């Protein structure tokens, strides 16, 4: 059996992107799963993908019997946040956490689980601003 995951795009407008991901683990966990593909044409604004301009502005999370590690995708992924328990992180006061634009940065967000037990679960709501440059 494998982890049962679902990803749902709740909002995909010209500025905002909200994605929900849920998982029920089989105990093997997840490793560097791309949960937000900032290079996807599905998220493009006027034909331009968000890429490294994507900013994370809010996370609502509920994580049980494991921890969830989020990273910015790149040649060497850059840690964004590690979550356990439940709560929310709000970065709107300073317009969100920008991509650090390290070597090979894509703007995408990766997810790994840490210490996942069988039937461990998580639900994440990620609210982002696309920040695509205006021409």
Image (tube, helix red, strand yellow):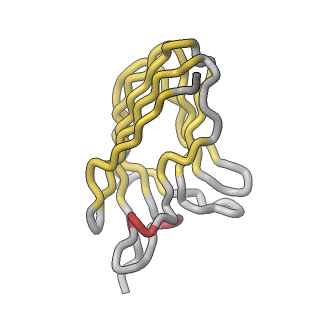
User: If the image is split into quadrants, where does the C terminus sit?
Assistant: bottom left
Which quadrant would residue 122 be assigned to in this image?
top left
Residue shown at the point (54%, 23%) measured from the top left: 67
x, y (%) of residue 128?
Answer: 37, 53
Q: How many marks?
A: 0
84 on left or right of 77: left
Q: Residue furthest front?
A: 1
Q: In terms of depth relative to the viewer, which is nearer, 31 or 2?
A: 2
Residue shown at the point (47%, 51%) measured from the top left: 36
Which quadrant would residue 79 be assigned to in this image?
top right
Q: Is residue 49 above or below residue 125?
A: below
User: If the image is split into quadrants, where does the N terminus sit?
Assistant: top right
x, y (%) of residue 100?
Answer: 58, 57
44 on left or right of 115: left
Residue shown at the point (39%, 65%) measured from the top left: 42
Q: In terms of depth relative to the viewer, which is nearer, 98 or 31?
A: 31
Residue shown at the point (34%, 44%) measured from the top left: 8
x, y (%) of residue 91?
Answer: 37, 45
125 on left or right of 112: left
x, y (%) of residue 95?
Answer: 35, 55
């Amino acid at each position: 059996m494998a982890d049962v995951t679902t990803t749902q795009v709740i909002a995909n407008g010209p500025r905002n992107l909200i994605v929900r991901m849920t998982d029920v683990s089989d105990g093997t966990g997840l490793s560097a799963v791309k949960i937000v593909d900032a290079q996807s044409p599905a998220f493009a604004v006027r034909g331009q993908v968000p890429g490294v301009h994507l900013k994370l502005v809010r996370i609502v999370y509920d994580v049980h019997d494991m921890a969830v590690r989020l990273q910015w995708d790149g040649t060497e992924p850059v840690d964004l946040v590690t979550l356990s328990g439940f709560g929310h992180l709000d970065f709107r006061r300073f317009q969100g956490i920008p991509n650090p634009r390290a070597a090979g940065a894509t703007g995408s967000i990766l997810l790994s689980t840490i210490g996942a037990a069988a039937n461990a679960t998580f639900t994440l709501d990620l609210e982002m601003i696309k920040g695509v440059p205006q021409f």
